Image (cartoon, grey):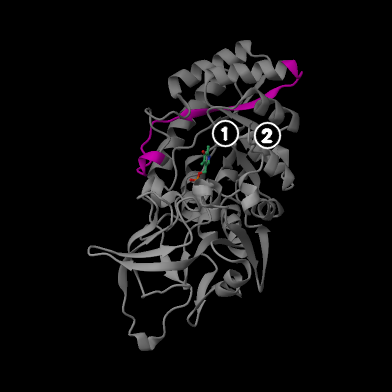
Amino acid sequence: MDYFNYKGKNLYAEEVPVSRIAKEVGTPVYIYSKRTLNRHLAAYGDAFASVPHLICYSVKANSNLSVLSTFVKGGSGFDIVSGGELFRALKAGGDPKKIVFSGVGKRDDEIEYALNAGILLFNVESGDELRAINRIAKRLKKKAPVSIRINPDVDPKTHPYISTGLKKNKFGIETKEAFKEYINAKAKLKNIELLGVDCHIGSQLTEIGPFVDAVRKIKRFIKRLRKEGIDIKYLDLGGGLGIRYDTEEPPHPTEYAEAIIEETKGLDVTLIFEPGRSMAGNAGILVTSVTYTKKGSKKNFVIVDAAMNDLTRPALYGAYHAIEPVRMPPVSSGGELVKADIVGPICETGDFLGQDIRIPPVKNGDLLAVKSAGAYGFTMASNYNSRPRSAEVMADGKEFKIIRKREEYKDLIRGEKIVK
Ligand SMILES: *Cc1c(COP(=O)(O)O)cnc(C)c1O
């Protein structure tokens, strides 16, 4: 559910006409809906209300400070994967006691930063990392709270680039090895506090089965750890719930919660979730203007002012995003649709936002909305082809605010130097 809807022929972000935002802010522009963000957070909160739990929104999906602060106000914690994300989370008012730190390659300085900030848990992905955290915590005279990320070897049945819970993936530690790491850490790593077990099996999952399979395996694992006197208090199930981009029918957080609550009954843990896409994905659109149209002998092209540097998912994963006109054509046009590739101006064949998309005929200056662009949209944007990154806007009821200025040319060369 989101709050980007047509009223008559015009697309609105909540109560604000999208065309008004485009006129005042220019294009390309990311537009988020605050009400949608709040609704998604509440959906998780309500679904898990009956059990001890913590929602740690995955910052990498959309890390704009206003998005983060909206979630802070709704009681959310954060899942971070870098020192930079910790910086953002704290700037947005995030409570360090609700922050978990994931990722396979945490550097010493990032570990130190997180220890000093007093985060809730490190999600540790290797024995090497565990020893690094112990060493740094010892130097700082602290105890580092830790979960080890288990690789439960379940197939999330998603795109290979976003599946993470198989043995062949770089993430987590296989159960057998992980067990040894817990035992060894308990005996030898005096500055580690073993508090949790973590997993994250992939992204854009559209079935509950793989989550349940993972929980079953981890449940047994937690029981074994407890027999060894390791008192696990947290079970972190990561993120990964899918959203509807096209015709997918991902489970609602309520269905997901029912299955998880049933499966973890009597386990006596606080559940942690790290949703990213399902919180922010459908809470954002990318609005772009048509620059030119071009008819090839095989294909029609609509050349727009947004490109793969603004929204990388189509180029990177061949991901589908629905693309719709911001203003529907008049009924008198007969409702005829044309098939076209929606492409950007970047010098790469992979620079498309959509291929063989059916849209009403468009012309120079028309606005298109790329849907479901709130997650892994702006956060994956770059300056490739020296394109300033787009503005970001938050719609809130009848109002909207710019929450990130459009970059200017001078931003492109910040920190650069011409050497003699
Ligand atoms: C990316 C990521 C998430 C969020 O995944 P979504 O599919 O966006 O919900 C959560 N946890 C970890 C460890 C991640 O890497």
The C terminus - image quarter:
top right
Q: Are marks 1 and 2 in contact (CB under 8 Å)?
A: no
Return the x and y of residue 268 as percentages of the image width and height.
59, 35
Of badges 1 and 2, the one in the foreground is: 1
Residue 34 visible, this angle: no
Could you tell me which secondary element the residue under label 1 belongs to? Answer: loop
Q: Residue furthest bottom?
A: 332
Instruction: Compute the Cα span from label 1 to label 2.
Output: 12 Å
Q: Residues within 10 Å of mark 2 (few under 14, many from 20)?
A: many
- Which sits in the foreground, 414 or 105? 414
Return the x and y of residue 205 as percentages of the image width and height.
41, 47
Q: Amino acid at mark 2?
A: Leu
Q: Amino acid at mark 1?
A: Ser
Q: Which residue is mark 2?
A: 120
Query: Magenta region: which residues?
Result: 139-161
Ligand 1 has an atom within 8 Å of the beta carbon of the residue at disc 1: yes
Return the x and y of residue 127 as percentages of the image width and height.
53, 18
Q: Which residue is mark 1?
A: 102
157 horizontally vs 279: left or right: left
Q: Earlier in the sequence, mark 1 or mark 2?
A: 1
Q: Residues within 10 Å of mark 1 (few under 14, many from 20)?
A: many
